[in-house]
Amino acid sequence: MIMSRDHPRYESLKIREKLVDGFKAGIVCAEGLIAHGRGEAFDYLVGEKTIEPVMTANRVAVAMMLAAKHPVISVNGNTAALAPEGLGRLSVKLNAPLEVNLFHRTEERVEKIIHHLEAHGAKDVLGKGANARIPNISHERAKVDKDGIYKADVVLVPLEDGDRCEALVNMGKTVIVVDLNPLSRTAQAASITIVDNVVRAVPNMIKLVDEMMTLSKSELEHICASYDNKAMLENVIRRIKMI
Ligand code: PTJ
């Protein structure tokens, strides 16, 4: 579809087009299109921009990733379609492997997503032939790589589901999620919740990594020390009511 740049919903329509193209290419699942619609509704509520309390969460998330021993970035169909280059850049800058991990898993889709990420510059993407399981999860997102999500101390998961978020937290991991719905079980269960669209969250994190990569371990720990995710979520909900 040809869209004029002066269309008032140009950016939003471009994002939809990326998801539809991803669906046609076998990267995004049909359910992913529905999930995006829910995300769009919440994006309206935050004014389609990164609101102030979320920048604090972003900063803490980047500090956690920089201070981690084994940070990993989990990628699903929607995020691969929306931010393939950004995810690859973030992975290189943080020295954190990307791992494809799908709720509606098929081996064919895992391979297509790995190929898509690598075509956009990502290196050594994990996820094929997952060889470990997250305990107490019965669905396909339990399947992980033993050298990736299974071993990670900090996991960044854009568009997580509530069950797995809780299971990862129960494994003792720090779980950073990107979810536009501040009320979702995922948002409530995560260690750090970035209530933002992945199309803004990924570039924001890249910028912050550039700014913060020279900080010492104690400076990074200081940034994380007083962070309270529940208070941050309450702040986001208050802001939404004011917009
Ligand atoms: O690719 P798969 O097989 O792993 O499946 C991906 C989906 C998204 C279908 C799967 O993870 C799923 O069912 O997700 P949920 O439980 O519907 O949750 C999606 C959450 O992401 C909702 O809370 C949405 O508000 C939120 N969301 C949707 N689009 C975005 C978003 N958050 C941030 N940025 C978005 N672009």
Image (cartoon, rainbow, N blue to C red):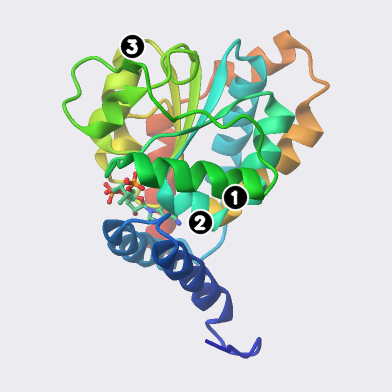
Q: Nearer the viewer, residue 34 or 241?
A: 34
First reached walking from the N terminus: tag 3 or tag 1:
1
Other residues around mark 2 within 10 Å, as few (<14) / some (14–19) / many (≥20): many
Quadrant placement of the C terminus: bottom left
Residue found 65% across the figure and 90% down from its top: 6
Residue found 66% across the figure and 33% down from its top: 123
**Marks 1,2: beta carbons within 8 A:** yes
Q: Is residue 80 left or right of residue 33?
A: right
In the drawing, what numbered circle is on residue 84?
A: 1
Q: CA distance from mark 3 to mark 1?
A: 28 Å
Residue at mark 3? 171
**Marks 3,1: beta carbons within 8 A:** no
Residue 38 vs 108, above or below: the answer is below
In the drawing, what numbered circle is on residue 81?
A: 2
As helix, strand or loop, the secondary structure at mark 1 comes to helix
Q: How many marks?
A: 3
As helix, strand or loop, the secondary structure at mark 2 comes to helix
Q: Position of residue 20 (x, y in %)?
A: 42, 69
Q: Is residue 83 left or right of residue 133?
A: right
First reached walking from the N terminus: tag 2 or tag 3:
2
As helix, strand or loop, the secondary structure at mark 3 comes to loop
Q: Nearer the viewer, residue 229 or 90?
A: 90
- Identify the amino acid type marked 2: Ala
Other residues around mark 3 within 10 Å, as few (<14) / some (14–19) / many (≥20): few
For the question of whether residue 77 can be seen, the reply is: yes
Residue 16 vs 152, above or below: the answer is below
- Identify the amino acid type marked 1: Pro
